[in-house]
Image (cartoon, rainbow, N blue to C red):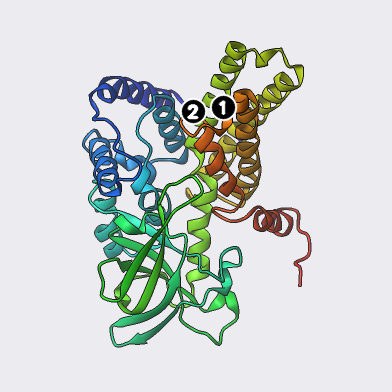
């Protein structure tokens, strides 16, 4: 395992850093968090700038190490987050790149990279969140189409999406993990109804999606029929393995800001608080090394992250919550002021032990696939 960077990778870092320094001051102001059409336009505009500058390819056509450098440098520079492009760039796109046909890759990947189309994720259901394999949304073959009925929940960016990476059950008689199929569903298809959901933090980036006999061309199936669980594991390996890389960098930055605020408001005099900040510093440094290790492993396995992503996701989720709990201690009574930094972040951090696979699920994966423990019954 090599955690060092090659001269070519360091040259890429320097070139990217120089470009970011020139272009970021020219960007328009970020729109209101509640104005999703404007946020979509803003996020797609940034993606188009990356494409025109030759950096959009890093999510799929570059090595995992180059991708790591890109995410690290853009976060450090304060560049716009992927935002509405999250599912397309970090979930659906890498999955299609790994599992799609040449025609599917040619149809769907360039518009994502050029900032022309937004994707959402239709995995979880009201009664199939953590236990994803128990999903009930049905799809049956009718000529050249699948006809889909059911519902999804926590569908990221559904209200502004053009496409949905959709999991459906195509064989209700098969064992749970063997009767699932991965489809790309157009969000403007007749029978699709989107109902936005408002989170604890007041945002509405999730939605319920109701599907009433929606026709999806069979040509939109990624992988074989009933092989969707295996394809889904590819999607989730990206979601848990590399999608949070930029957030680790952001947390390390927040940690430094918390230390500065504690010195300013007198909380630094509390030795217990200083110990917490020191421990968190060690935690996030270790998480960054774990990220590099996972990327190194992906380099040797064709670019797809392995089960080490579950180790990372499990520890990162709890470390992020501890970070923002510490932020509340630094702020004191101001931690109830929604206009103060880190307060809304603390509310959103509560979801991290649920999103992208609950901590209980990650522990099961670690126990069974890494430690070799027997499966529960």
Q: Is 347 rendered above or below residue 124?
A: above
Which residue is painted at 42% across and 38% down in the image? Answer: 67
Counting residues from the N terminus, which is met first, the one under dot 2 or under dot 1?
A: 1
Name the one closer to the observer, 166 or 222: 166
Q: Residues within 10 Å of mark 1 (few under 14, many from 20)?
A: some
Which residue is painted at 56% across and 64% down in the image? Answer: 129
* Apparent side of residue 369 relative to residue 106 in the rendered image (left or right): right
Which residue is painted at 39% across and 57% down in the image? Answer: 92
* Apparent side of residue 251 relative to residue 54 in the rendered image (left or right): right
Check disc 2 and report its element: helix, strand or loop.
loop
Q: In x, y percent, where is residue 51?
A: 25, 39
The picture quadrant where one finds residue 178 is: bottom right
Q: Is residue 3 visible?
A: no
Q: Is 183 rendered above or below residue 15?
A: below
Name the one closer to the observer, 238 or 250: 250
* Apparent side of residue 167 relative to residue 104 in the rendered image (left or right): right
Q: In x, y percent, where is residue 28?
A: 23, 30
Q: Is 121 rendered above or below residue 244?
A: below
* Image quadrant where one finds the N terminus: top right
The picture quadrant where one finds residue 61 is: top left
Q: Residues within 10 Å of mark 2 (few under 14, many from 20)?
A: few
Q: Please say if the residues under marks 2 and 1 sit with CB atoms less than 8 Å apart.
A: yes
Q: Which mark is residue 334?
A: 1
Which residue position is annotated with label 2? 340
Name the one closer to the observer, 64 or 180: 180
* Image quadrant where one finds the C terminus: bottom right
Q: Is residue 208 visible?
A: yes
Q: Is 369 rendered above or below residue 125?
A: above
């Amino acid at each position: 395992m090599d955690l060092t960077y090659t001269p070519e990778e360091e040259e890429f870092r320097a070139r990217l850093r120089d470009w970011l320094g020139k272009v970021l001051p020219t960007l328009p102001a970020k729109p209101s968090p509640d104005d999703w059409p404007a946020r979509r336009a803003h996020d797609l505009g940034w993606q188009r700038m990356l494409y025109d500058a030759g950096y959009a390819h890093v999510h799929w056509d570059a090595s995992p190490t180059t991708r790591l450098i890109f995410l690290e440098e853009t976060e450090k520079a304060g560049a716009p987050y992927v935002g509405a492009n999250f599912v397309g760039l970090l979930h659906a796109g890498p999955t299609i790149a790994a599992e799609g046909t040449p025609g599917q890759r040619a149809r769907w990947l360039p518009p994502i990279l050029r900032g022309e189309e937004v994707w959402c994720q239709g995995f979880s259901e009201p009664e199939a969140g953590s236990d994803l394999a128990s999903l009930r949304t049905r799809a049956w073959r009718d000529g050249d189409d699948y006809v889909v009925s059911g519902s999804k929940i926590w569908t990221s960016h559904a209200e502004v999406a053009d496409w949905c990476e959709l999991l459906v059950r195509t064989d209700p008689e098969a064992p749970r993990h063997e009767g699932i199929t991965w489809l790309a569903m157009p969000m403007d298809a007749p029978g699709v109804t989107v109902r936005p959901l408002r989170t604890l933090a007041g945002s509405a980036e999730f939605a319920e999606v109701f599907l009433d006999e929606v026709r999806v061309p069979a040509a939109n199936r990624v992988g074989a029929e009933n092989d969707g669980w295996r394809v889904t594991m590819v999607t989730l390996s990206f979601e848990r393995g590399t999608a949070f890389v930029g957030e680790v960098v952001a947390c390390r930055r927040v940690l430094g800001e918390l230390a500065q605020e504690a010195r300013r408001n007198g909380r630094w005099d509390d030795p217990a608080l200083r110990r917490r900040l020191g421990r968190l510093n060690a935690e996030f440094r270790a998480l960054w090394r774990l990220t590099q290790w996972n990327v190194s492993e992906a380099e040797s396995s064709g670019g797809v992250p392995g089960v080490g992503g579950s180790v990372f996701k499990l520890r990162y989720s709890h470390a992020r919550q501890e970070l923002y709990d510490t932020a509340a201690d630094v702020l004191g009574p101001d931690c109830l002021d929604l206009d103060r930094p880190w307060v809304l972040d603390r509310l959103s951090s509560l979801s991290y032990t649920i999103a992208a696979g609950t901590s209980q699920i990650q522990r099961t994966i670690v126990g069974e696939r890494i430690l070799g423990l027997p499966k529960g019954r």
